[in-house]
Amino acid sequence: MKVAFGMRAHSGWAALVVVGKRDGNVLVVDRRRIELVEDEWAKQPYHAAENLKPDAARDVVKRGIAAAHRIAVRAMRAAVKQEQERENEVTACAVLIANPMPDWSTQEILAVHFRMHKAEGVLFRDALVRAAEACGLRLVAIPEKLLTKHAERALRTPASGLVKKIKALGKPVGPPWGKDQKDAALAGLVALQGRSK
């Protein structure tokens, strides 16, 4: 069957929900957490670099970003391969994204604490976006704060109907089915719908 990924990132990991359509019915094919770091410090590379000298700080941040991108590609390829082994075709990958950041240097980010949090929030979302592109998947980037409005328009369903649909979608798979999984599933449905137009 044709399936789509929906992904919601956090610092160092992401919720992945794979949705598909069989006999006109939408279902959750898979739901899991994927790790995007191998080392604990890499969850917050800007925080890890906070008290270092400028050259060392830039190096730590650069290594953290490169690792996140490398690991995200590896995780995305593994997820695609798993679906192929199930004889499914991954048609798209929806990633919930944040507002873009100003073009700050590493030093400008490290100079203001809230900028470090913002940069780390964007880092893993960007890693997933790049991984989807590296795997040749059709990317559907959805601003996280606009997910419901985007889904209402794409799925032609009011917000109340979306809530019911996502709740029902999660019942057969059981817990965990919290905000991460629900948002990822809704994003995945938007991506899946885009393919069937």
Image (cartoon, rainbow, N blue to C red):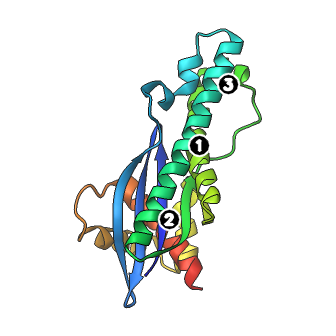
Q: Is mark 2 on a helix, strand or loop?
A: helix
Q: Between residues 81 and 30, which one lies in front from this camera angle?
A: 81
Q: Is mark 3 on a helix, strand or loop?
A: helix
- In primary-sequence order, the first of circles 3 and 2 is 3
Figure check: 145 above or below 69: below
Q: Which residue is drawn at 23% across and 71% down?
A: 172
Q: Is residue 194 left or right of residue 20?
A: right
Q: What residue type is labelled 3?
A: Ile
Residue at mark 3 to residue at mark 2: CA–CA distance: 30 Å
Residue identified by numbered label 3? 109
- In primary-sequence order, the first of circles 1 and 3 is 1
Q: Which residue lies furthest to the bottom in this view?
A: 23
Residue 158: mark: none
> Residue 52's x, y, as percent?
61, 10
Residue at mark 1 to residue at mark 3: CA–CA distance: 20 Å
Q: Can residue 115 be seen in this view?
A: no
> Residue 26's x, y, as percent?
38, 80
Quarter assignment of residue 110: top right
Q: How crowded is mark 2: few (under 14 residues within 10 Å), some or many (20 or more)?
A: many
Residue 69: mark: 1
Q: Which residue is drawn at 35% across and 70% down?
A: 29
Residue at mark 2 to residue at mark 1: CA–CA distance: 21 Å
Quarter assignment of residue 122: top right
Residue identified by numbered label 2? 187
Q: Nearer the viewer, mark 1 or mark 3?
A: 1
Q: Which amino acid does label 2 sit on?
A: Ala
